[in-house]
Amino acid sequence: MFEKILVPLDGSSLSEKALPHAVELARKFGSELILLRVVILPVRPEDVGMETMVPLDFPALEDKKTEQIQASLRRVKERLKADGVPVRLEVERGAPAAAIQKFVKREQVGLVVMSSHGRTGFSGWVYGSVAGKLLKALTCPVLLVRIPPKELSSD
């Protein structure tokens, strides 16, 4: 039913709460499990008409961040090895919701499984919800794993 199942991760243990659900579905449907992290590109001073006194090597910083993310994904993949489902690791760059949406379309993902941090109030308004944006934008099914409030304070 679902050839590819995508689990967007953000590096937090809360985002990994979606993994057991995704693994179970991948096993049941014989799906490939794709773990995706998005490298958020920084706003460069020159992009907003400012210059810095100290030159920063943004490409090198982005490359280093990408390497760290890839290492983190490899650790998650290693933990999932015993589950017996094929796992692919992917890293994209950009704004998380937009990058995930483009990836889903390009890769023809059949199902997205992700956890929601459940931000509400001011922090939800300021940061927006990646899950909320994806629920509105994606045409494929999305399984949203709700994190109990007591677990939100631990991450």
Image (cartoon, helix red, strand yellow):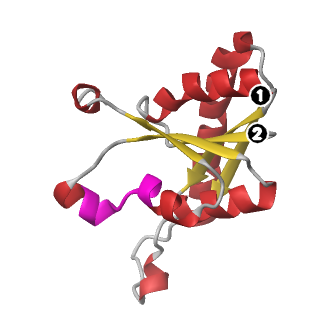
Label 1 CA crowd tier, 10 Å (few <14, some 14–19, many 20+) = some
Q: Specify the principal SS of the magenta part.
A: helix
Query: SS of the residue at dot 2?
Result: loop
Q: Nearer the viewer, residue 89 or 86?
A: 86
For badge 1, the amino acid type reads Phe
Three-letter code for the amino acid on which mark 2 is drawn: Phe
Residues at marks 1 and 2, CA–CA distance in whole angstroms: 6 Å
Query: Looking at the figure, which quarter contains the N terminus?
Result: top right
Q: Are marks 1 and 2 in contact (CB under 8 Å)?
A: yes
Above or below 14: residue 119: below
Residue 100 higher or lower than 54, as above or below: above
Query: Which disc is residue 2 wearing?
Result: 2
Q: Who comes first in sequence, dot 1 or dot 2?
A: 2
Q: Which residues are magenta?
A: 124-132
Q: Is residue 75 visible?
A: no
Residue 29's tag is: 1
Asked which secondary structure carries label 1, the reply is helix
Residue 92 spot, x, y in % from top left: 66, 55
Is residue 22 found left or right of 84 in the rendered image? Answer: left
Question: What's the residue at 73%, 15% (across, down)?
Answer: 81
Percent across and percent down for residue 104 are 70, 56
Q: Residue, x 28% and y 49% (percent of image)?
A: 119
- Residue 93 placement: quadrant: bottom right
Q: Left or right of 27: which side holds 122? A: left
Q: Residue at x 57, y 26 (%)?
A: 21
Is residue 15 in the magenta section? no
